[in-house]
Image (cartoon, rainbow, N blue to C red):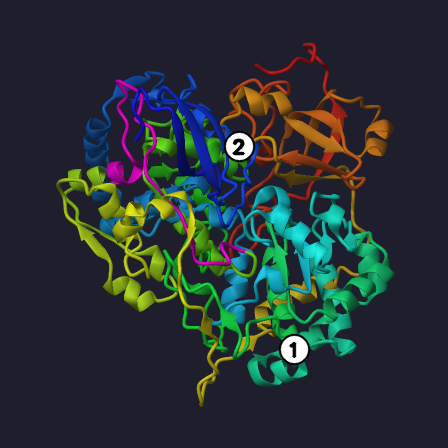
Amino acid sequence: MVTETFTGQKHVMCRACHAHCGLIVDFEDGVPVKTHGDKDNPEFEGYSCIKGRQLANYHSFDTRLLTSYKGMKHGEKQPVHWRDAARDIATRLERIVDEHGPDAVASYVGTFGYNNVNAHAFMLALMDSIGSTSVYDSVTIDQPGKGIARALIGPWLAGAPRVGDWDGLMLIGTNPVVSMNGGLGMNPAKKLHDAKKRGMQLIVIDPRVTDSAKQADIHLQCRPGQDPILLGAIAKVVINEELYDKDFVAGDVEGFEALKKAVQPFDAGPAADRAGVAAEDIVRAARMYGSWKKASISGGTGTNMSGGGNITEYLNLALTSIMGHWLREGDLNRRTGVFTKPAPPIAATPGPMPAWGFGRKLHSRDLEQSISGMPTSALPDEILTPGDKQVKALIVLGGNPMLAWPDQLKTFEAMKKLDLLVCIDPRMSKTAELADYVIAPKLHYEVHGNTAAPEVYGGFGAGWGFENNYAQASLPIMESPEGADLCEEYQFIHALASEMDKTIKVKSWALLAHPDEREEKATPFPPGETPDPIIAWSASLNGCPADIAKLYEDEEVQKGKIVEAQALLVQPKPAGWEGKLSVGNGAMMEELAEYAAKLGEPVEDGDFPFRMIGRRMTEIHNSNWHEDPVQRKRVPHHPAFMNPADMEALGLSEDQPVELESARAFISCVAKADKTVRAGCVSTPHSWGTNPDEKEDPLGAGGNTGRLSYNDRDFDKRTGIPLMSAIPIRVRAKPAEVELEAAE
C-alpha cells in the first residue's frame, strides 16, 4: 500500500476485463499518475489496452459511489452504511422466503462479477444457504453454446495443443485481437503476429473485416447467422475427401457416420448462396483446414448471439475431434495449474455428459437449466409471471441487466415489478437507478486480486486462459478515499448471510474438473466476523496446487511470474477405457438438418433489410465508465458502423444521427462509414443506452441494442438465448435536434 509521500512504481493486475494483464502504476507523492504495461511480465510482455491504462482514473471519478444508497426505486436516494443495508436486506429476504419460498430470491452475476471468482464463489454459497435454485449469470446470454457443445462431445482430458504449435486457426464470429476473448490466449495481437511469422495459417468467418480478419489467409465475409451452414459445407469436404485423422476417429470417436450423413446436403454451391460467399472459397477453406495437423477453432459472441450457437460450437468441436487436434499420448502438457487443479493428463475422454434435462423447469417457453446455467433471457418472465417460484427479489453482482440483457423493454418492466432489487456496483448504473439498494464496493487498486479467473477460463478450450503456469497475485496499492464507506463484494455477501443467521459453504473454483472433491472441500463460514481477503481467496481456490497465502507474499508473483512446475507427459488411455468423443449427437444432428432445409431458399429481407451485428471496440468499454474523457474522446457517440455504399444508398452522411428499427423497437445512434462492414449489416456496440423511460440521445448514451430484441422469439430452446446479433432492422435518418459535438 502506498503512502501519501510514495513516489515510485507498483505492480498490479488489470481488472478491466477477464484477461488480467500485468500493469505498472507510477505514483508521485502517493498519487497514481500513469498506468502502463509491464515489459518484463513473462505472459503479457508489456501489453495493455487503453481501458486498463485508465483504471486509476476510475477511482477518482465523480460518478464513483463512495457510499451505498437506498430508495432509488421510489425516487428517495439516501446514503446508507453497507452493514445497515445488509441488515435491512436480510430482513426483507427472510420475509420473501417465508411468504414465497427460497426460489423467489434470484441472483445474477454479470461479467465483472464472473471475473471476480472470489465474490462469485461467495454469491453461489449464499444462494445455496438460502436454498434457491434461481441462480443466473451472463454465460447464457454470451456464449452458452460452448458449455453445451463440450458436454455433448465430451471433454478431452489431456487438453489441446498450445498456440505456438498450431499449423492453423479458424475464428468464427470472434475478434480476439480486440476482445481478448479466446482463440489466441493472452496478448493476442503479438501471438497472432508471431504465429503468422512462423507460418501458421488463419481462416476467419465473419461479416466484418475485423482486426483478426485483416491477417487471414482466407476470410469468408458471410451474412450473419449462417455459420452452421458454412461449417456444414466445410465438414462435408473434410469428410468426403478423407482429410480427417482416420486412426484417431477409429479409436476415440463415436457418431462419425451420423455426422457424415448429416453434412451431405451441404454442397458448397447452395451453402455459398445462402451465406453470401464464393463456393470456391468454402472448398479452399475446407482443404486448408483439412491440411492442418495441429490446430484450433474458436467461436465467439458473434456466432453465439446470432442464432445457432449450439450447433456452431458443436461442429467446431466435432471438426476438432475428427481431425484429432488434441494432445496425444507422449505430448507435453505444460499447463499443470497454479490456481486451478486440472484434469489428469490422459489421452482420453470420459465421453459425453448430459447438457440439459436436469435442474428445474421455468415458467416460460418450456425452458430449463442447462449445463451452461439458468436461461438468463427468461428471468424477466420469471419475475413477471405470477405463481409458484415467481421471482420477487434479485441480487445483482457485477452486472447491469438494463443494458446487458436482451429485450430491454420487458427487462424494464421486470425490474420495476420486483419487491426487492439489490445491486453491488461502483457506479449508479441504469439498473441501480431502479434498485432498492446499491452497495458500493472497493475498486481495482484497493483490493487483493489474482489471475485465477483466466486460468479457470482455460477450460473453455484451446486459446483460452494461460498456456503456462503463470500467476499474478496483486496486493492493494491504494487506500480507499478518505471518508468513504466501502467493502469488498464478498464481505457484503458474508455480512448478508450473517444477518440471516446462515452458514455459507464456499465451493472452490479450483476444483471444477473434480466435482466430488469440490463438494468435499467446500469451506464453511458461519455467521459472525467476515474472513480477511487471504482466507476468503484460499476458500474460493481451495485444493489448488499453490499455497494462496504464500503466493501473495512472493514479490515476484506480485509482479507476474511463471511458476515453476514440471511439465507432464500425456499418459496413454488406460486399458478397458470406454469413453469416446461423440460427434453425432441426435439433437445436434436435428439442428443441423434444420439448417440444411434452408439451403436453396433465399435469405428473406422483408421490411427489415439490414442486420444489426454486435461489436467490441478497443477504445472504450461496451457497458461502463463511458464518462472517462480519454476513452470518450476517441468514441464520443454511440456508433452505428455501416458500409459506405449502404450509407450512400440511404442518403446518410458521416456522423449523422440515425434510427435502427427492428420489429420490437427502435434505437438512436450515429452513422459512421466503415468499409470493413459487409453491405447490409450495421455494426453497433452493445450495452450502451438509457432506460426506456428516458429520452434517447444519439449524441450522448445512444441506444441500447437489447431494445431491438424479443426474449421470446427466435430463441434457443436449450439455453433461451434469443437473437442478440444478426437482428433484422431497417435504418433511417433521425432528425437532428442539436449539432454534433463531443459528448461531455
Residue for badge 1: 258
Tell whether position 481 is magenta. Answer: yes
Residue for badge 2: 51
Vertical order, 254 against 120 (above or below) = below
Q: Residue 111 carries which label?
A: none
Q: Which residue sits at x=34%, y=66%? A: 515
Query: Would you say 608 lies left or right of 686 here?
Result: right
Please tell me which residue lies in front, 514 or 109.
Answer: 514
* Position in image of residue 130 (x %, y %): 24, 48
The amino acid at mark 2 is Lys
* Position in image of residue 27 (x %, y %): 40, 25
Vertical order, 312 against 23 (above or below) = below
Q: Which residue sits at x=73%, y=70%? A: 290
Q: Can you say which quadrant of the picture contains the C terminus?
A: top right
Vertical order, 520 against 137 (above or below) = below
Q: Which residue sits at x=14%, y=48%? A: 526
Judged from the image, the secondary structure of the residue bearing numbered disc 1 is helix
Q: Magenta residues? A: 464-493
- Can I make out residue 587 in this image? yes
Q: Marks 1 and 2: CB-CB under 8 Å?
A: no
The amino acid at mark 1 is Ala
Q: Can you say which quadrant of the picture contains the N terminus?
A: top left
Q: Which residue sits at x=60%, y=55%? A: 309
Res. 672 image quadrant: top right
